[in-house]
């Protein structure tokens, strides 16, 4: 079942719009039934994810639950992730290692990166002198709110919450028992998707972030973060997501 919010967005959630985050109260429309406009019935077709059967969220590229790619019609795997060319050693410059993508500029196949410059022995592998440890600090910032209705529901007095990035992957988003989504970093913001973004620990002890095709997007250090691309992050970086959430990365001992 899907619903329509007061702004006309299709929503998978009955409580808050999964696109704009506003509350859905009495204006719920069941998309399993025809809509009526001027007494004329309009049949609404639902598009389901072929992998998990979840409703596609308002034409989103990725399935919110299993990350199926509707554009390329491929299921989510690590091999499908696009790696920016700027993040790869400049010694890899053969045109045979490049693949063309219709959305981005040239990117490099991650499988080819793993095969390049393999050390002959363990002595050639360099490790950082100090392991990097980061905390994610979640802040409620009412100054970010642009919707008048959201000002009433914003938890203005909520204290900052701190989450250590101790796992190899830490999912950030809104909890959904119905969809069995339980993020390691849970955000209580109606404008945040259930699977919004993911922090990934790299083999060299550094960290990266992956935007998971959220409904309202992510701003990293003042710029929109493109979904589907692994982006390196560090202490001091700042994210803005949802209606009122500001996120800071801080180094810890």
Image (spheres, helix red, strand yellow):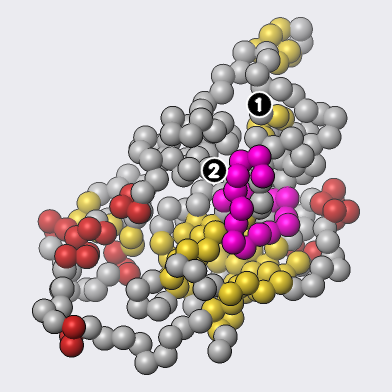
| Residue 193 point in image, percent of width and height | 62, 49
Residue 163 spot, x, y in % from top left: 63, 72
From the image, which quarter does the N terminus lie in? top right
Q: Which residue is situated farthest in the bottom direction here?
A: 129
Residue placed at 60% from the left, 44% from the top? Answer: 180
Q: Is residue 74 above or below residue 194?
A: above
Q: Is residue 163 above or below residue 236?
A: above
- Residue 56 appears in view: yes
120 to the left or right of 42: left
Task: Report how many numbered discs are placed on residues in the image.
Answer: 2
* Viewer-nearest residue: 222 or 87: 87
Residue 11 position (above or below residue 98): above
N-terminal-most mark, 2 or 1: 1
User: Magenta segment: does it hold 65?
Assistant: no
Q: Which mark is drawn over residue 64?
A: 2
- Magenta residue span: 177-195
**x 56%, y 19%: residue:** 45
Residue farthest along the right direction in this orientation: 152
| Label 1: which secondary element | loop
- According to the picture, the residue beneath numbered tag 1 turns out to be 1
Image height of 7 relative to 100, above or below: above
Asked whether 155 or 37 is in front, the reply is 155
| Residue 228 x/y as whole percent | 43, 53
């Amino acid at each position: 079942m899907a619903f329509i919010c007061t702004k006309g967005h299709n929503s998978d959630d009955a409580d808050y719009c999964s696109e704009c985050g506003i509350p859905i109260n009495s204006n719920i429309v069941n998309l399993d039934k025809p809509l009526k406009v001027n007494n004329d019935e309009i049949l609404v077709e639902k598009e389901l994810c072929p992998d998990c059967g979840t409703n596609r969220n308002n034409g989103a590229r990725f399935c919110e639950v299993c990350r199926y790619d509707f554009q390329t019609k491929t299921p989510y795997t690590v091999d499908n992730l696009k790696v920016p060319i700027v993040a790869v050693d400049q010694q890899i410059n053969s045109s045979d290692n490049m693949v063309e993508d219709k959305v981005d500029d040239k990117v490099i196949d991650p499988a080819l990166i793993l095969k390049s410059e393999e050390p002959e022995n363990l002595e050639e592998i360099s490790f950082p002198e100090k392991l990097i440890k980061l905390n994610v600090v979640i802040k409620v910032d009412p100054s970010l709110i642009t919707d008048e209705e959201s000002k009433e529901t914003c938890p203005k007095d909520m204290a900052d919450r701190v989450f250590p990035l101790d796992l190899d992957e830490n999912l950030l988003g809104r909890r959904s028992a119905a969809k069995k989504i339980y993020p390691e970093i849970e955000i209580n913001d109606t404008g945040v998707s259930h699977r919004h973004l993911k922090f990934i620990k790299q083999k060299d002890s550094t960290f990266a972030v992956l935007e998971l095709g959220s409904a309202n997007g992510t701003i990293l250090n003042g710029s929109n973060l493109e979904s589907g691309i692994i982006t390196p992050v560090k202490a001091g970086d700042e994210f803005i997501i949802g209606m009122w959430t500001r996120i800071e990365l801080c180094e810890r001992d």
